[in-house]
Image (cartoon, rainbow, N blue to C red):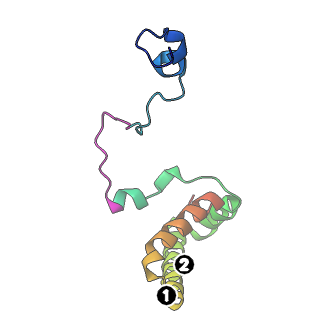
Amino acid sequence: ANGFSLNTPKMALSGVAGGSSFVVSQRPQQQTSNKPQTRNGASSLQMGSMAKFGIFSPAVYAAKIVLGNDKLNKIRGKAISLHSQYIGDFCQWVGAYHMRTRLIKKAKTNGDTLGFLV
């Protein structure tokens, strides 16, 4: 008879009134940063001197010494161009041309991890 009266001790409501920390907030936390997040395609695709050292990095350094930086960059540019073209052809053949850009970026990331971009 006393289960729902207003004179019920707070101990019965301890799970709701503050005894439980399970439900604090179910809203996703938004991260705030002081700098504005502006990204353009050109800056996000450049590697420069920030490339990782990978398994093929010694071969790339040797090619820089033997061929010279200009010749190596010319060969590297041709290889990247052909690879991007083959990715586009593959995506068109499969019927997933909308995935082309994503796959090219993934190839660039893998090339960096393997050490081709040092």
Mark 2 to mark 1: distance in Å? 24 Å
Judged from this view, the residue extending furthest toward the front is 1
Q: Magenta stretch: dominant SS?
A: loop
**In front here: 32 or 73?**
32
Task: Give left or right: position of 40 versus 9.
Answer: left
At x 52%, y 83%, the residue is: 82
The numbered mark at residue 81 is: none
Q: Is 75 placed above or below 43 here? A: below
Query: Is 95 colored magenta in this rendering?
Result: no
In the image, is residue 1 above or below residue 84? above
Q: Residue at x 55, y 70 (%)?
A: 72
Is residue 79 in view?
A: yes
Residue 79's disc is: 2
Nearer to us: label 2 or label 1: 1
Element class at badge 1: loop
> Which quarter of the figure has residue 29?
top left
Residue 37: say if magenta.
yes
Q: Which mark is residue 95?
A: 1
For the residue pair 72 and 40, the one nearer the viewer reads as 40
- Residue at screen point 67% across, 63% down: 62
Look at 67% across and 56% down and name the residue there.
54
Comparing 97 with 51, the one in front is 97
For label 1, count other residues whose C-alpha is less than 10 Å away and answer few (under 14), some (14-19) or many (20+).
Answer: few
Residue 5 percent coordinates (x, y): 43, 15
Residue 16 x/y as whole percent = 48, 22
Q: Earlier in the sequence, mark 2 or mark 1?
A: 2
Residue 90, given in percent of the width and then of the height, sits at: 54, 86
Q: Say which quarter of the image contains residue 40.
A: bottom left
In this view, the residue in front, 82 or 39, is 39
Confirm whether residue 70 shows in the render: no
Q: Which residues are magenta?
A: 30-41
The percent coordinates of residue 9 (x first, y second) are 49, 8
